[in-house]
Amino acid sequence: MFTPQPIGFVSSPFKDTKSIPKGIGAQHPEEGELRILPEFEAGLTDIEGYSHLIVLWAFDRSDGFDLMVTPPTDSRAHGLFTTRSPRRPNPIALTVVELLGRDGGSLRVRGIDMLDGTPILDIKPYLSNVPAEKLRRGWLGEAEARKG
Amino acid sequence: MFTPQPIGFVSSPFKDTKSIPKGIGAQHPEEGELRILPEFEAGLTDIEGYSHLIVLWAFDRSDGFDLMVTPPTDSRAHGLFTTRSPRRPNPIALTVVELLGRDGGSLRVRGIDMLDGTPILDIKPYLSNVPAEKLRRGWLGEAEARKG
């Protein structure tokens, strides 16, 4: 298909996975930087107009996968594709961040949940929401309801 | 980093790119199927509880990239990472679909904008929205406002 290549790297306060908040109601208020490589910087033109970005990145410190996963949010196992487990057939992650500012190839953002040094694969504009009244969130919604 | 592999393929009414609606206000009401390969089917366990899914897939019929892009929605060029252009350093696409039903490894979904036969890289649960009052959508929002 294609050979993944980093377009940049994350500068993050998280140096190990244990320090990243997980589970129900986990907040990600941390700020960090998306440092885009000079050869891709022109692709950021006009990005300041967007409040939120979708960042695709590689789980580069993850290996292999299991099809059933017991996530930190629940005591029961669920199908991998209903979870955000880093261990996936294609170890691609997605994070929505708030864009705070730009300095050349560096984007200052809020909502970091990546490890420091994580390779960035792509940045896309966040364009629209699913209407809240139409959204059902499976076992995660149920686990949140149980926790209250 | 990793070698992308299909976890399945899209069954879509779109046989060529020209038939896919594009531009401001483009709707994607089409239904199709995400056909997950038998060896990954167990990873779909419990997915019926989710109304919406994030599908990551490969622009497998796209080649190369330009850092400045004039999208169908505007007459001006913008940075690649503010657009949904298929020509990207890592040709990974993202589509949010509504899950209508499941039959084994086949997910019937609404909101298809992929070509028939497109390789699927990952499926993730759609969990939350950016608050509408906090969302700014850059040149796309401006182009929509001009169009009225």
Image (spheres, coloured by chain):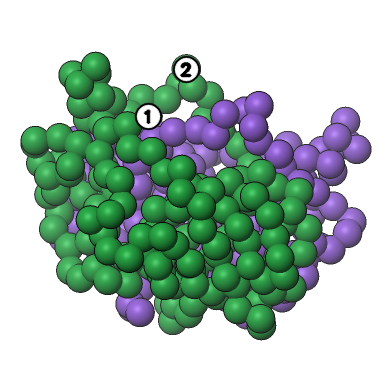
Chain colours: A purple, B green
Q: CA distance from mark 2 to mark 1?
A: 11 Å
Query: Mark 1 is on which residue type?
Result: Ser
A26 is higher (above) or lower (below) than B101: above
Q: Badge 1, how many Cα within 10 Å: few under 14, some, many 20+?
A: many
Residue B95 coordinates in the image, percent (x, y): 45, 51
Q: Residue at x 31, y 59 (%)?
A: A8
Q: Is residue A6 visible?
A: no
Q: Is residue B14 visible?
A: yes
Q: Residue at x 71, y 39 (%)?
A: A136
Chain to which mark 1 belongs: A
Residue A131 coordinates in the image, percent (x, y): 57, 29
Q: Nearer the viewer, residue B50 or A101?
A: B50
Chain to which mark 2 belongs: B
Q: Nearer the viewer, mark 2 or mark 1?
A: 2
B53 is higher (above) or lower (below) than A125: below
Q: Residue at x 35, y 56 (%)?
A: A122
Per the image, label 1 sits on a secondary structure element best described as: loop
Query: Mark 2 is on which residue type?
Result: Glu
Residue A113 coordinates in the image, percent (x, y): 55, 49
On the image, which quarter does residue A130 sit in?
top right
Q: Nearer the viewer, residue B102 or B125?
A: B102
Quadrant placement of the N terminus of chain A: bottom left
The residue wearing badge 2 is B133
Q: Residue at x 89, y 56 (%)?
A: A75
The residue wearing badge 1 is A51
B74 is higher (above) or lower (below) than A73: above
Quadrant placement of the C terminus of chain A: top right
* Left or right: B7 as drawn, with respect to A108: right
Label disc, if present, on residue B55 of the rendered structure: none
Residue B77 coordinates in the image, percent (x, y): 10, 41
Per the image, label 2 sits on a secondary structure element best described as: helix
